[in-house]
Amino acid sequence: MNNSIKIGLLFSAWMLIGQISLAQMIVPDTLSIREVVISSYRPVEQAGRNERTIDTLILKREADASLSDMLSRYANVFIKSEGRGALSSASFRGMAASHTHVEWNGLNLQTPMMGMVDFSLIPVYLMNKITVLPGAGSVTTGSGALGGTIELKSDPDVVNGIQIQLLSGIGSFSTFNDYLHFQAGNSRVQTSTRIYRNSSKNDFWFLNKDNADIDPNTGVYIYRRQQNTNAEYLLEGLMQSIRWQPVSGLQVQAHYWFQHVDRGLPRLTTYEGSDNANITRQVGDTHRAASKISWSKNKSKIIVSNNLNNERMVFSMKNPVNGNGYFNVYYSVSSVLSNDNKLEYHYDAGKNTLFKAGYEFDFNHVVSKDTVKRTGYDQYRRNNKLFLSWQQKWSSLFSMQLYLQKEWVNHESLPPVPYFGFEWILPFDHHLVLHSNVSREVHYPTLNDLYWQPGGNPDLLSEEGLVSSLGLRYATEWKRMRWSGNVTWFYNNIRNWIIWLPEPFMSPTNIKHVVSRGLEMNLKTVFPVHNFWILLRADYALNISTNLGDAAKWGATVGSQLPYTPVHSGNFLADVRWNGFFATWVYHAYSERFATTAKNLTARNRLDPYAVNDLYFGKKWSGKSNSFSVQMKIYNLFNIQYWSVLQRPMPGINYMLLLNYQF
């Protein structure tokens, strides 16, 4: 770990040379209401994409949070969390976590090994733009994104001089979060360096309802308060970004991200053994690098991208043996090396027409070995992809996009993937936009799906299906009050859905037919009241995702909701600001979920619905060249007990105090 940190620091220092003589600049923290002009609201590049960019205000409020916590509070994304600081995955519209594509500055964070991303390991502080793109429109960003795409950007801000930000937090369960952000720039070069360290003992108390004593006289169950042990975590790293424009029309971007993680994995609440047994840990290092060169001349633009991802992760469990110390029950070492290369050509035939064509080649090598059980696999995967895109604005009211891609995985040819999306500003009300998209989707099995030992299934079929949506978007301004809203209906028809089930050990299999349908709604308003600024935002999602497979194979599970998929979910935000003071109330809720596909309503397989309230408040002082703010956060304000995953407790009421200094 020490060598990796030194390499990263040297790399960052080299990129910062020559920038320290520039003047300071402070980016103001303001809310503004601008005139809404729907006819020019979206450029042709966004035709047919029903995307949402997370508000800058939210990114500032949640700077110390993980991406999983932030998305659970502010987006129509279901976060399945194994506990505070533990594995967290994200899914859209009743789809699986492996159907969520995640990009960081164009680099695919999904490894071919597991096919999903642990969002608890992504600090919000590292990102200055987060875009959520659900449904069919995500096909244009990556392969196999049946549910949607989350795009993360850490581009340097435009700074004329030097800007430094220090953020430090102390909270419950011996939690310490520290961040440093250094920015420098001039007319040609912008640099950004972020260094961070998050740690916590994570030793909260909870009422364990999975283990109980029985009163011999009354027969009443007596539940014990229990402490969350072996759950401490450490997350530290650095991120360096640079943007350079040597001449007009030519731009070079480079990003580097190193991260080290060391965390314990707490035992299940059903565990009844010794406190010294089943000690499980995850330790690993990750190096990521993303580069892009863009060259524009006249109506043409060429983009060359090269990305590298190198991960090494160790999962281990040890037990004491007859007083002779600890011995490993398993010691699994996984290493992933991925290299993505992309060449794009854009032709701008006018402000209303854009053509794109490109080729992408990805190389992946995964080695997964358990040195105790002597099992594992060593596999390569090569992906080749060609794509074409036509985006057209036919009038001031109507725009559309056509997209087609063809992909090969190793020597296997996948079916072509077409996409069509449009937006139509309704002529009788220019504040109202009808939008729709539809695409074919193909998702190839991950390497763990095929080769994991024991349990991998080399006979798995690729998931294929139709992903579609239809919606209305509305935006207007009335008496200094700005309103915007959206309602979207979606329908996803998937064949050969891949699901892991205990048979008797965990193993993947195909469900012949799964249908996911429902709707998403959101409403946002910003308005002043005297000297107060008020922001209100609400989101709601209805997700019905059912197994419609062969009744002869699946029996009573046919027609049931898929595991860990809430039918109802929603969140609400209220933010008030006055003279540097601010207060934020955050509410998010999920309906009941089930751990299996069976129609079994027993408490053993059912997770109760829950609603969590958080409250933030603080004060910001601003000077000519610096600012200072203090913020207090109260999580789980009403101290409810809830679970996101069976037998994985979540903390009750807890606190975080943040100090932020910028100069």
Image: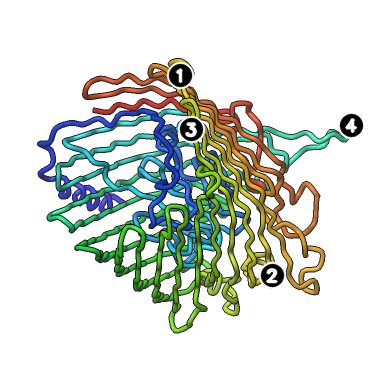
Q: Earlier in the sequence, mark 4 or mark 1?
A: 4
Q: Earlier in the sequence, mark 3 or mark 1?
A: 3
Q: Residue, x 42% and y 70% (percent of image)? A: 366
* Res. 43 visible in picture: yes
Circles 3 and 4 in contact, beta carbons < 8 Å: no
- Where residue 429 sits: x, y (%)? 54, 44
Q: CA distance from mark 2 to mark 1?
A: 52 Å
In the image, 376: left or right of 463?
Answer: left
Above or below, 238 against 455 in this view is above
Residue 477: which disc? 3
Residue at the disc numbered 4: 218
Q: How is the image coloured?
A: rainbow
Q: Earlier in the sequence, mark 4 or mark 2?
A: 4
Q: Mark 3 vs mark 4: give the one in front.
A: 3
Outermost residue on the bottom side: it is: 411
Amino acid type, label 1: Phe
Residue at the disc numbered 1: 532
Q: Residue, x 64% and y 43% (percent of image)? A: 569
- Where residue 520 sits: x, y (%)? 61, 48
Q: Earlier in the sequence, mark 3 or mark 2?
A: 3
